[in-house]
Amino acid sequence: MKIVVCIKQVPGSNRVKFDPITHNLVREGLAGRMNPFDENAIEAAVRLREQVGGEVILLSMGPDATKETLHDGLAMGADAAYLLSARAFAGSDTLATGYILAQAIRQIGGVDLTLFGRQAVDADTGQVGPIVATELDLPQATFASKIQPLAAGRLAVERDLGAVTQTVQLTLPAVVTVRAEANRPRYESPIAIQQSLHKPLTTWTDQDLTLDASRIGQAGSPTVVRKVFAPTPPTRAAKPLPEDPKAAAKALLDILQAQGLL
Amino acid sequence: MERQWTEPEQMLLRMAAKYTDTELAPHDLAMAHTNRYPDGLVEKLIKTGFLTVMLPEAYGGAGFGPEVTAAMIERIAKGSASVAATLEGHYKSVDAVLRFGTDALKKALLPQAASRILAFGMTESTGGSNPMGIQTTAKRVAGGWLLNGNKVMITNGGLAQVYCVLAKTGDQELSVFVVDQDMPGFAFGKREDFIGLRGTPVGEIFLTDVRVDDDHLLGRVGQGGHIGDVAHADARILMGAVLSGIMQHALSLAAKYANERTAGGTPIGQLQTIQRKLADIKISQETTHLLWERAAFAKAQGQPYAELAAMAKAHGSRAAVAACDDALQVYGGYGYSNDYPLAHLMLDARALEIAEGTVEKMRTAIALAELKKEEA
């Protein structure tokens, strides 16, 4: 099975700054790390390869520093990696990113399964996986908590949707986004770390892909961030109860009844 | 200024940091209470590949150098000094086999060192810093040696499967042999109930007519004292790193507490008496770090490093005990409680004033080296 895992480098710290004009995250000078859900996607891919054979290819879009994160993924057991990096990609929103990734997956060719983490922890949209599936016109299953290969090019996926769990069967090729509950990602072994730098890592720019220039970068991004702010939790005044236990019980009862809670 | 690590080195340190914070640190206090590692901890450590870190690639290892290995030990010690000490015991023994083992022994033994723990047994009940006083003997037999004796206080004793053992091959002659727990005549003794580093097993072994082949002799006959010294020096670099890690742990706890705890409406961290302690801990941690780093650098460059390594441990161990004592004082009554980690950190550090050569013996060695430089 030829599996592509799309991964994202996210800020390694919560102390982030936003551009005052574009309201986008300022990524320059920020130490990056792999989006934690993407580790689950890589682990799922490596386990599938261990079960049915094949190869695991990492795909990421970002600046050159993203190579560090790709090396981490290679050390987790992926076989090869592609970095999509070009000035023309800067400012891409989820739609433009999904389009670029889909074109890269087409170019890699013969991909049976594309995996994503359920969402990236920096923007928390969870949109890119479904956009790629739509671009490639492939069946998709989001929020996978279990992935089981079946015979004849099919895959059983358990979708954990909180209140309900849904089991679906997909015909490959397909796109799946993976929840943290799906597995516990392995640690990169010291030997795998040393080997990771010898695995193939290819950089593709906009010139290497077949792209519609109006669909990439700022031009291809309809998303406008109007405002970024830290939510202020609603505050309510505490109401002290009387000292005397009986009076306190009575006062509490009155409050609960007034709120319609009893 | 931070050292510039290569990308694989950075990856190793990142992985070790994550592993420590997720898999080790949450169990550290429980180790101090129970005098053991939680079930499965060592197996997971081995499965993740921690035994392979400094083992050369030719023997199936990852082949990382002495500097990043020590830096990784420091990071692990920040979460669990016990686990860091277990790895230290393994690495120094692997180093000894690498340097002094015959090709046949290295080919047979070192690939196993990725999954089997190695240890070094020097100390006997007659003393650790008195090598000529040992009772263990190795007698020449056809094609090999017959070992008899009892080694105590071995780091990883009972956990390790392979032991480098110091034995007398003559009245005033020491040699080192490699024995395996599976050899007939090999037996484990009791585990020590030490007051610090309580996760790390420290135990004894008995050798009764254990026969080893010629190629299980490390180095030459009579080279045992030297091999022991080299193993000690290798260990002391890593012990310096353990001590620096313990101090980082203590400082992080003390600073957090000093920010949270208030007295008269002000965080105690704003009091100069508390600031003085935090500053002293930091100075001790940095000086110890610099010493082990310099020793590791010298080792990586092929320069003499035994004296620097001795300094790292001699300075670091007393400094760390004092630093943990300061951190304990910042914590007040909670610091003195076994429900909090400060007391056990202090006792962890205290172990290293004794283990791998007492600080007294190290100071003697440092002084003798300096005296020799100025001999007429």
Image: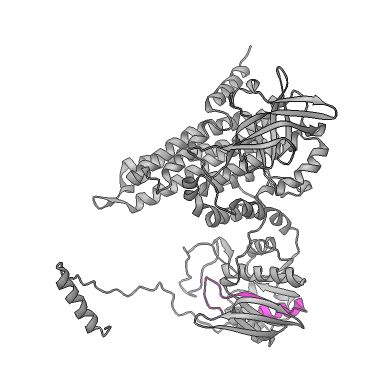
Q: How many marks?
A: 0
Relative to B262, does residue A13 appear above or below in the rendering?
A: below
Position of residue A43 in the picture relative to residue B142 (left or right)? left
Q: Position of residue B197 (x, y in %)?
A: 52, 41
Magenta-colored stretch includes residue A146? no
Identify the residue shown where x is 77% and y is 42%. Answer: B109
Q: Position of residue B192 (x, y in %)?
A: 54, 37
Q: Position of residue A157 (x, y in %)?
A: 64, 80
Identify the residue shown where x is 22% and y is 83%. Answer: A257
> Which of these two is toward me, B325 or B65?
B325
> Which of these two is toward me, A128 or B75?
B75
Q: Which residues are magenta?
A: A99-126
Q: Residue furthest top?
A: B376
Position of residue B340 in the picture relative to residue B130 (left or right)? left
The C terminus of chain A is located in which quarter?
A: bottom left
Residue A58 visible to an observer of this rendering: no
| Quadrant position of residue B163 | top right
> Which of these two is toward me, A19 or B119?
B119
Identify the residue shown where x is 56% and y is 60%. Answer: A31
| Quadrant position of residue A259 | bottom left
> Which of these two is toward me, B375 or B141?
B141
Q: Position of residue A153 (x, y in %)?
A: 75, 82
Relative to A32, does residue A114 appear above or below in the rendering?
A: below
The N terminus of chain A is located in which quarter?
A: bottom right
Residue B18 visible to an observer of this rendering: yes
Q: How is the image coloured?
A: one colour
Magenta-colored stretch includes residue A116? yes
Relative to B259, does residue B293 appear above or below in the rendering?
A: above
